[in-house]
Image (tube, helix red, strand yellow):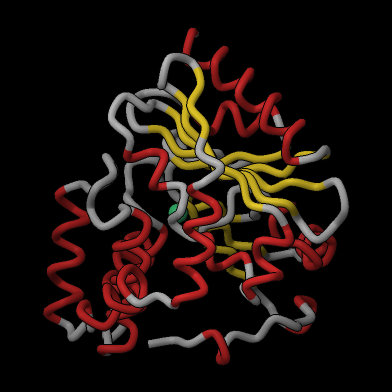
Amino acid sequence: MLFRSEIVSEASLADYDVVVVIDCGEAARMGKLVEQLSDHPCVVNIDHPGTNDGFGQANIVLPKVSSSCEILFTLFGQWGVTITPDIATNLYVGLYTDTNMFKNMNSTPEAYRACGDLVAAGADFHTAAKRIYIDTSAARLRLLARVLSTLRLDGDGRIAGMICTGEDLNELGLTPDALETFVEYPRAIVGVEAAYLLRELKEKGQVKGSLRSSNNADVAAVAQQFTGGGHTRAAGFRATGTLAEVRERLVTALLTALEG
Ligand SMILES: [Mn+2]
């Protein structure tokens, strides 16, 4: 399995002949590397459903495929790459998380088949599931308690969401990673069509939002009204304002989207 400590975050793209960007809807999401990316002569952009602006010189954007890892798996097969257990585990994690444990509508027969092949190649699905969806800490449960206490419903119970302040994370000694999957709680409420989780960013007056929908509501379209994008059922954005202000603006936008 690839661990965070093995990920290199400082790189000069000019040192490389080809830059492959995976699962990234727009160049702007490359953060510090965005300028280097636009200057680079050979960018390969690999992505699947959602909003992708085709920023690469080559764009492999396949709207019917579950995940970028499924695209990689197919490419590796075409190229004759030997799928080692480590490669299998990493590709499996991409498929497993992007289909939200095969709960999302992108859980196609092809996605299940790819996962079967990856398990046959030695993917450690048990450790992956445990580390991603089961293991937790006391601090993280305390954060969940705080965040759940901010639950609010709007639009006759069709919209549900929660907020997380900077202090919530700081006081518990946690990083924003701890919030991963919390938005699934409001989404799980029967009758909720769109769910959100807002959190204060370190930059004063900046808020990050995660959006999920549980039917046909297109939350990517709502995210695009702010500064963001994503998939129909899972999207994200950044906005300027306090948590309370952004919450009001977002709820209004979601209500309008659900009426439409
Ligand atoms: Mn993806």
- In the picture shown, does residue 254 fall above or below 26? above
Residue 92, image x and y in percent?
29, 71
Answer with left or right where residue 104 lies relative to residue 69: left
Farthest top residue in view: 259
Q: Residue at x 23, y 83 (%)?
A: 124
Q: Is residue 89 visible?
A: yes
Q: Quadrant of the N terminus?
A: bottom left
Q: Quadrant of residue 29?
A: bottom right
Residue at (26% x, 57% y) in the render: 101
**Towards the viewer: 167 or 72:** 167
Visible residue check, residue 54: no
Q: Residue at x 76, y 56 (%)?
A: 201
Q: For the image shown, how many numbered marks are present on the structure? A: 0
Q: Nearer the viewer, residue 173 or 219?
A: 173
Looking at the picture, does residue 255 appear above or below residue 197?
above
Quadrant observed for ligand 1 in the rendered image: bottom left
User: Horizontally, is 253 left or right of 61 in the view?
Assistant: right
Where is residue 247 shown, x and y percent of the image? 67, 32
Above-or-below relation of 70 to 254: below
Q: Quadrant of residue 20?
A: bottom right
Q: Quadrant of residue 6?
A: bottom right
> Taking 187 as reference, is 129 above or below it?
below
Which residue occupies the foreground of this view, 44 or 84? 84
Measured as percent of width and height from the top left, residue 107 is found at 23, 48
Residue 119 in the image, given as x and y percentages of width and height: 16, 77
Q: Residue at x 74, y 46 (%)?
A: 207
